Amino acid sequence: MAKTEQSPLHVYKTGPARSAWALLVLSGICILAVIMLGYFAYLGEIYQHGMARSFNSIIPYLCIGSIFVCTALLAIGKLITQKRTEITLLEDVIKVKSKARNYGIPYKDIQYIFRRHDLFLYFIFPVWKKEIAIQTQTGIAKIDGSIDHFEQLVNEVEAKVYPTFYLDCQEILAAGKSISFGVIQLDQQGIKFNEEIILWNQVAKMTVAKGNVILKYWIAAKLSELKTPANTIPNLPVLLKLADDYIHSAGSF
């Protein structure tokens, strides 16, 4: 019997490199401004001192202009080398198609999903880079924020994976075992957070704020907190949901 082809739920493709285009436009404007200023300075020197000294007046403008020319070339290089990727979400698999290779990631094989949102320098300009890393038994696949509607893509993948993963985690905890989420470990008794062990009846809440996972807990009638970068925690929504369940069942406020 022939296997029927699944209809795609959604197809996501690489969008325009907006940061590179913005940098290219900005560099072009700056180059034009430097050329105009240098030209007027050149004319002024000719008028006052003659041709002999006129070239010296534009040397600073040539140096500044060369910086923006290099910046523009860097932006053009990024546009030329930008990877074109197509992500197709099917009922039970994620299909990734790029120039380098094509592969599929079955939802049932996904073990961890990391959301990353990092700040880095693109030449001399700060740029936010977004990506998700999907880990399976066979390796890690990374999808970056160059995909159009990136947040919608991530939300759809998480909606497919996390409900089943959450139920599996509940069963593991109910059996008396522990589950690790990076540096955070949960069991029926409490949380191990960066080597600190906090019982559930001590925990006030676990939240995400300013790029950190923050655990607030009571110790000696004082509210304390522990934190770790959210980028380092896999399956973060599942962790928050499980922690919330145990905090409420322990009657902690």
Image (cartoon, helix red, strand yellow):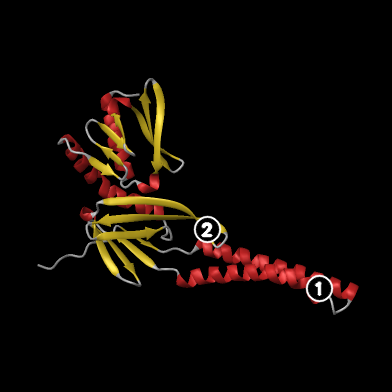
In the image, farthest residue toward the bottom? 51
One can see residue 197 in this view: yes
Residue closest to the eye, 245 or 85: 245
Relative to 160, is 140 above or below?
A: below
Q: Which circle marks residue 213 in the picture?
A: none
Crowding at dot 1, Cα within 10 Å, few <14 / some 14-19 / many 20+, comes out as: some
**Residue 1 spot, x, y in % from top left:** 9, 67
Residue 241 as seen in the image, left or right of residue 78: left
Q: How far, Cα to Cα, is label 2 from label 1?
A: 35 Å
One can see residue 39 in this view: no
User: Which residue is labeled 1 in the image?
Assistant: 42
Relative to 207, is 6 above or below?
A: below
**Numbered disc 2: secondary structure:** strand
Residue at x 41% of width, y 60% of height: 147
Residue closest to the eye, 102 or 214: 214
Residue at x 15% of width, y 66% of height: 3
Relative to 92, is 37 above or below?
A: below
Indicate the quadrant containing the C terminus: top left, top right, bottom left or bottom right: top left
Q: What residue type is labelled 2?
A: Leu
**Residue 194 spot, x, y in % from top left:** 34, 39
Residue at x 26% of width, y 59% of height: 90
Residue at x 44% of width, y 43% of height: 211
Residue 253 as seen in the image, left or right of residue 75: left
Relative to 197, is 79 above or below?
A: below
**Residue 104 spot, x, y in % from top left:** 25, 63
Q: Which circle marks residue 121 in the picture?
A: 2
Q: What residue type is labelled 1?
A: Tyr
Mark before the other along the chain sequence, 2 or 1: 1
**Numbered disc 1: secondary structure:** helix
